[in-house]
Amino acid sequence: MMAARITSCVVVLLLAVVSVAHADDSDPWEEPTNPQALAHLQQGRTLFDLGKWEDAIKEFEAGALLDDRPIWMYNLGQSHRMAQRYDRAKWYFERFITRIEGMSGSEEDVATVRRIIADMTAAASRPPTSTDAQRASGSTEPAAEPQSRPATGSISGSPSRSAPRWYEDWVGWALAGTAVAASATATGYYLRAEALRDDGDASKEHGPQHRLYERADDQVAVGTALLVGGGVVAAAAIVRFVLVDNGGSDVREKTARYTVDLGPGSAYVTLRF
């Protein structure tokens, strides 16, 4: 009975942490995990930086066939835009917006891409210039009138945006809230155990007294499991806050590991960065 209660508490805590982590996975700029797709992405970026728009498009299209992530739509939109195929670029940008709308924190990205589409539409409506011919030919020379053209943007990540601070990170606060809830629940179990012990001390019969003491021990065990689990989640929240404050939106590129060692009447949490 006691083991079942402890297992249930640990499972609830793990589910809470996993659900929070899963919610954070909704990232429009997440890169592919497929090695072949990642290779196409990196090669496409290199070709884009060299001004080889057509070759970059081929790489991004090949990667998109292997991996279904919004970042391909954005990169293909940028590549077609630089090649001055504005209709195709708009199509890909709109697909990108459709894919990321509703994701947490995507509002600024959507607004930025909509501005790119608007600037691109304005550029498409004006007569072609020598700068346009230079851009379409794949030349890497800077445009003569950069202020009149849509922003080039970066295909290697999201449009520029300010990095969030630790107090703006809802994932960290969700973890912290879970830790507080676990600690509060553990306190309730400890208080219940104390009350059961008092009832056992007041009991005159050995049988009922023994059962009350056993119930009190069960309450302490469950409370301790919750307290340890809450400590682990609190440590994860602290790590999250530190990484977000130091790395902004690139927090997913940093890792932190923890281990929990349990001993008689003790628990140790070790963090490794």
Image (cartoon, grey):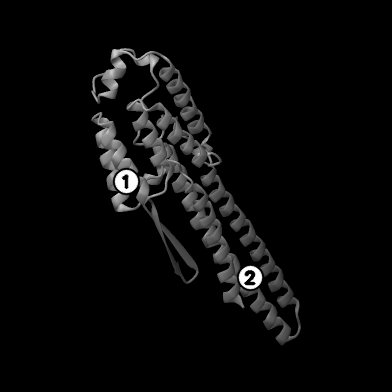
The local secondary structure at tag 1 comes to helix
Residue, x 41% and y 48% (percent of image)? 68
Where residue 173 appears, as percent x and y from the top left, is 55, 45
Which residue is nearer to you in this view: 218 or 45?
45
Q: Nearer the viewer, mark 2 or mark 1?
A: 1
183 left or right of 117? right
Residue, x 75% and y 80% (percent of image)? 203
Which residue type does callout 1 highlight? Ala
Where residue 218 appears, as percent x and y from the top left, is 62, 74
Residue, x 41% and y 34% (percent of image)? 158
Q: Is residue 62 above or below residue 207?
A: above
Which quarter of the figure has residue 129?
top left
Can the viewer see residue 70?
A: yes
Which residue is nearer to you in this view: 258 or 82?
82
Can the viewer see residue 246?
A: no
Of the numbered discs 2 and 1, the one sitting upstream in the chain is 1
For disc 1, the marked residue is 62
Q: Is residue 1 above or below residue 260?
A: below
For disc 2, the marked residue is 219
**Mark 1 closeness class: few <14, some 14–19, many ≥20 residues within 10 Å:** some
Which quarter of the figure has residue 61?
top left
116 left or right of 220? left
The local secondary structure at tag 2 comes to helix
Residue, x 51% and y 37% (percent of image)? 106
Which quarter of the figure has residue 261?
bottom left
Which residue type does callout 2 highlight? Gln
Q: How many marks?
A: 2
Quadrant of the snapshot with the N terminus: bottom right
Say which mark, if any, is on residue 133.
none
